[in-house]
Image (tube, helix red, strand yellow):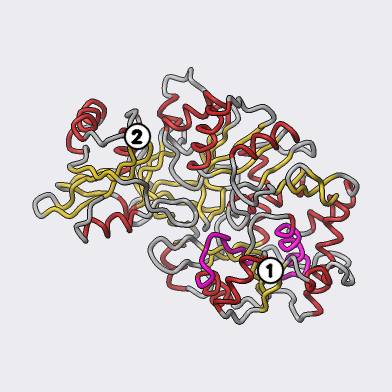
Amino acid sequence: MNIGQWLMRTAQMRGGEAAIYLGAEPVADYAGFHDRAARLAGWLGAQGIGPGDRVGIFMKNCPEFLIAFYGVWYAGAVAVPINAKLHGREAAWILGHSGAKMCFATPDLAGALDEADVEAAVVDVTGGAFAGAMEAEPVAGPAPRELDDLAWLFYTSGTTGRPKGVMITHRMLIATSLTYLASVDPVTPADATLYAAPMSHGAGLYAPVHVLMGARHVCPASGGFEPGEIFDLAKRLGNLHLFAAPTMVKRMTQAAKAAGYGGEGLRSVVYGGGPMYVADIVEAVEVFGPVFVQIYGQGEAPMGISALSREEVADRTHPRWRERLGSVGRAQAGVEVRIGDAEGAPRAVGEPGEIMVRGDVVMRGYWENPEGTAKTLKDGWLMTGDIGTMDADGFVTLQDRSKDVIISGGTNIYPREVEECLLMHGTVSEVSVVGRPDPEWGEDVVAFVVCEGALDEAALDAHCREHIARFKRPKAYFAVPDLPKNNYGKVLKTELRKRLEEGAGG
């Protein structure tokens, strides 16, 4: 089945209802959305692009992004969305690696691709070629595809080297969408989903379920994430929900407190994509109320590993509410989750090990990377590379990426636990903890800290001694103006380790 079928069916049933907005202004109903996708697919076919061919999408969030997604799928081709924050050369590498024949781009990004001299044909979505495509003869409907045919090539963030192309199938998109309804949040035609996070990433992966349910799709006029714009759209459109990275949630909380905004019109914020510290989500719930749902996933199992419901995020009555709030919830409906040892055998309740996942949301493999695929997929299980525990009630708590665990004196120390502790101190706004080589102990714990005011090492050390074991506390602190992050907002611990190796510290 082609995932594009959902758009055609919704257009048949709700053709006259608003589908796509730019800011608060509707720009297409579902009949128009379907028609534009069908015309783009017809035009792609006339350019020699058909089932299985790859087509890049290098855009900021805008209505044309959705049209491109579905036009590519209607043609039976494979979408290759690229984060708009990437450099033109990085985007060009992805296009070359995927073998994309064409790439749709917004004007500024089209220029970056031209400078990178890509082989794929670049189509500016504000130009004449794209306008002509909207006048092309439409296809009758989405091209037939099998469930295990590719729909999307998702390129990982590449924090340790070149990004890998995760092969996402139509089956995976269907499973992710239906699991969203079962385990994350209901969706109705009265809802409006806002694309404030990159549509090349988690936000775009949630487009199909909102198409299926006939919801409104809102592209911010800014093309990205602006807290004030989100609050205004929530009040004007109502029933607004969005996917947000933890750093976005923190910024929204700070902006709402400054503006006196209490969440009017905001129905749900699904957060994930990185560690959300307990102190931050407690404050966010105090400001916005019970609107938050946490999900845990990876590009290799997009958005679909576990979830912590809005009731669990907002609960302050359970005797273990803080512990549960520090978890990533329980397995979503469409997967099995296991904590395994080095050979993949199940660990006992509460024992740390690698988080393993299997189910229809798990990738088929990496594009043209059989070695990487064999290393990551074992006996049907996805080896996530994340270390965690599972309690007797099924709540999974992330401890760290396996490569980030600090081993000091033969004892494992999980940076996230130390980071959680430091963030409880009123002067710490951001922190990242890494290991520093030590000739006696193997590794020392060190912390890079973004402070409000001057760094007070003695106060932070006393705070750590009060809340965690002495051996876990940092042996050194470095004050930094900000933490290095990649284009997905994830902290680059490799860069921090490099600074230590070079003796640069802060």
Residue positioned 18% across, 31% down in the render: 458
Q: Which residues are magenta?
A: 64-89
Residue at the outermost left position = 440
Q: CA distance from mark 1 to mark 2?
A: 43 Å
Let me know if residue 116 appears in the view: yes
Residue positioned 19% across, 43% down in the render: 476
Residue located beneath label 2 in the image? 452
Q: Nearer the viewer, residue 381 or 9?
A: 9
Dividing the picture into quarters, in which one does residue 161 lie? bottom left
Residue located beneath label 1 in the image? 104
Label 2, residues with CA under 10 Å away: few <14, some 14-19, many ≥20? few
Q: Is residue 463 above or below residue 345?
A: above
Dividing the picture into quarters, in which one does residue 498 lie? bottom left
The picture places residue 411, in percent across and down from the top left corner, at: 20, 45
Q: Nearer the viewer, residue 454 or 47?
A: 454
Is residue 378 a member of the stretch shown in magenta?
no
The picture places residue 343, in percent across and down from the top left corner, at: 34, 57
Which element is circle 2 on?
loop
N-term-proximal mark, 1 vs 2 = 1
The picture places residue 110, in percent across and down from the top left corner, at: 64, 70
- Residue type at the position of mark 1: Phe
